[in-house]
Amino acid sequence: MRLYCTKDYQKMSRKAAGIIGAQVVLKPDSVLGLATGSTPIGTYEYLIKGYQNKDLDFSEITTVNLDEYKGLSRENDQSYYYFMYHHLFKDININMERVNIPDGTKEDGDAECARYESLIEQYGGADLQLLGLGHNGHIGFNEPADEFVKNTHCVALTESTIEANKRFFTSADDVPRHAYTMGINTIMKAKKILLIVSGEDKAEILKKSLFGPVTSQVPASILQLHKDLVVVADEAAMSLIK
Ligand SMILES: N[C@@H]1[C@@H](O)[C@H](O)[C@@H](COP(=O)(O)O)O[C@@H]1O
């Protein structure tokens, strides 16, 4: 594991974008695994700057996103497709045909999850998977559970995740109760994993994830077993790690 501690959110974002940018430069046809949530927004802003400065070319890049809410269409402004389009894709030269996100509108969840899993399998996993960290240790939407779920699957969101994500919706009642998410093995198949974490409210779960026991009750703890894990966290998130 490589652990970088940055002064603040901006510096975390710049460092993370630098790592993703290096991947894009070194392998222009990379498969990038992308994430949503508030943490990666600054990273995406720096990637857009890299494109505008002509340092980064995304024309050959393929993307796979971690997750999507069940029941939300691409046009829904709370869907992760919409999020990705508005925070990144619309401002870079990505070929939208190479953008992959689970389709939240597919009623047959099993079929959609199997399709998504085999797509990632065909790519041989992401070259680099970007991850945020949920307050309960979730990655993607892999929630604390009695066992790790291997492949892309449909998950019932926990109350704490619904609570944390309600800020993006009119009320907690509007937060979808289910989501499609890459499984733990889907994520671990990535050749490199970049975990970004910001804020004091994540300090405890970051410490547990990186230095606590590997357990499905803290899904991110599995990342300790990845052979190329890079963590970029700001001082506030790192405050409990000496
Ligand atoms: N499914 C996403 C996760 O992929 C993300 O990492 C998490 C943390 O979000 P934030 O970065 O806003 O704290 O939120 C959501 O639940």
Image (cartoon, rainbow, N blue to C red):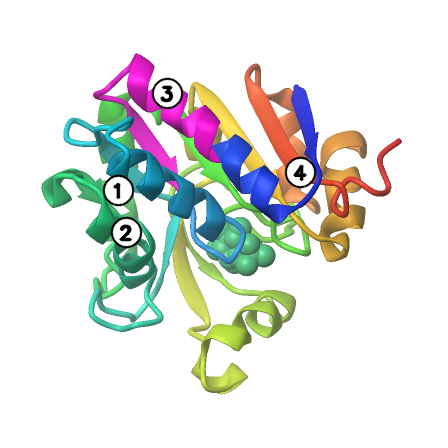
Which numbered tag is attached to residue 233? 4
Q: Is mark 3 on a helix, strand or loop?
A: helix
Residue 184, visible in the rendered structure: no
Q: Is disc 3's CB within 8 Å of ligand 1?
A: no
Residue 195, position as x, y percentages in the image: 57, 35
Q: Is residue 87 above or below residue 233?
A: below
Q: What segment carries the magenta color?
A: 17-34
Residue 232, position as x, y percentages in the image: 62, 33
Amino acid identity at mark 4: Ala
- Asked whether 9 falls inside the magenta stretch, the response is no
Disc 1: CA contacts within 10 A as few (<14), some (14-19) or many (>=20): many
Most foreground residue, 179 or 23: 23
Most foreground residue, 173 or 232: 232
Distance from Cα at disc 1 to Cα at disc 3:
23 Å
Distance from Cα at disc 4 to Cα at disc 3:
19 Å
Amino acid identity at mark 1: Tyr
Which numbered tag is attached to residue 102? 2
Most foreground residue, 113 or 73: 73
Q: Is mark 2 on a helix, strand or loop?
A: loop
